[in-house]
Amino acid sequence: MHLKLLCFLVYYLSLPHVTHGFVEGLYCGKESCYDVLGVSRDAVKSELSKAYRKQARKYHPDVNKTEGADVMFRSVATAYEILRDEDQRRDYDYMLDNPDEAYYHYYQYYKRRLTPKVDVRIVIACTITIISILQYLHKLHSYDEAIKYAMQNPKFRNQAMQIIHQEGLLENNKKSKNKRSKEERKREEERVLREIVEDSIDIKGGYSKPRIEDILWVQLICLPYYSTLYLKWYLRWIWKFWILKEEYGDEEKSYLTYKNLKLSANYWDALDDYSKETYLEKELWDQMKCRKYKSELEEEYRVKMAESGRHKMWRRYMRKGGPGQMTFAED
């Protein structure tokens, strides 16, 4: 009996302080929000607005200089913010009618205060949009840098200038030529040169021309379609090469080769035909042969580094203690 009474006292003392349905620290505290505004519980929004304007003019710090006026002004503003929102008012009325559910009132109050006001879906959509824009601009910048490099390269620039002179793209009559300044003619030449370079050079890989299909938004929209294609391709692969044990075709050999070499599809596409044929002649689609090829490359690199004078200096430096060595030699 005494144990039950002790447990009840502990439970009672652990409850938040509740006074006549008002929970300290929630909403308007120990005062009723309706009493703060001077309205009844049945007051409509127009009555709330009228009462708020009246009380705000009465307790505004610029008008009322008495002590405690600023505190009362904040209480009036808090009461109005709570009662004008239908959801908060509903929760507040429920607290007044059910004062014993203190923990629930705390949960509802702070859940509403801490929950973001903006729809999460809008935030996600805006984030994806920003990423897509930045992604496209980055690709456009990389492509522009590649074109500028090609225009400065003597080989590509001379070839483009030959095409310009052969097709007469810059030949104008003397009158129009005399009317334009030297800077205008230079800009026109660079514009035509850029067009020729863009049409003549097929840039692949990370510096390729940006496409709408590559941005995140389009990829997410097309994800179900590409997932279906991949599943169809994977099932076909299992059926043809795992079950029927058919031989690989050229496309399958190329795919396995750049996968075993840990190359991306874009990098493989950017390789010249000679490099691709060299890899395929070594039959690197076979994992055993690919591992052997990698081991040979590592050994060749190790021998090359061992014969390098700079590498020998580095090894001597490391044997003497490396970056952490102490020396008393004067500079």
Image (tube, grey):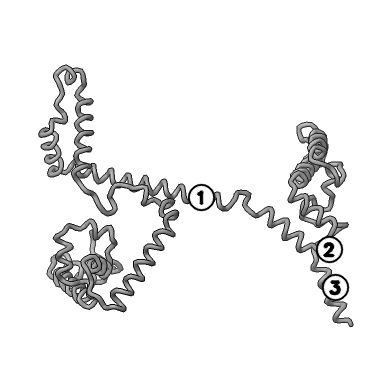
Query: Neighbour class for label 1 at 10 Å: few (<14), some, many (≥20)?
Result: few
Which is in the foreground here, disc 3 or disc 1? 1
Depth order, front residue of 243/29: 243
Which is in the foreground here, disc 2 or disc 1? 1
Left or right placement of residue 304 versus residue 93 in this view: left
Residue 150 against residue 265 in the figure, above or below = above
Tell me the number on the disc at residue 100. 2
Residue 236 against residue 172 in the figure, above or below = below
Q: Is residue 3 visible?
A: yes
- Where's the N terminus, which quadrant? bottom right
Q: CA distance from mark 2 to mark 1?
A: 42 Å
Q: Position of residue 112 (x, y in %)?
A: 69, 54
Q: Residue at x 34, y 66 (%)?
A: 233
Say which amino acid is labelled 3. Leu
- Would you name the residue on which mark 1 appears? 125
Number of dots carrying numbers: 3
The answer to which of marks 2 and 3 sits earlier in the sequence is: 3
Residue 237 in which image quadrant: bottom left
Q: Are marks 2 and 1 in contact (CB under 8 Å)?
A: no
Residue 271 against residue 192 in the figure, above or below = below
Q: CA distance from mark 3 to mark 1?
A: 52 Å
- Where's the C terminus, which quadrant? bottom left
Depth order, front residue of 6/283: 283
Query: Neighbour class for label 2 at 10 Å: few (<14), some, many (≥20)?
Result: some
Q: What SS does tag 1 mark? A: helix
Tell me the number on the disc at residue 9. 3
The answer to which of marks 3 and 1 sits earlier in the sequence is: 3
The answer to which of marks 2 and 1 sits earlier in the sequence is: 2
Depth order, front residue of 314/17: 17
Q: Is residue 74 visible?
A: no
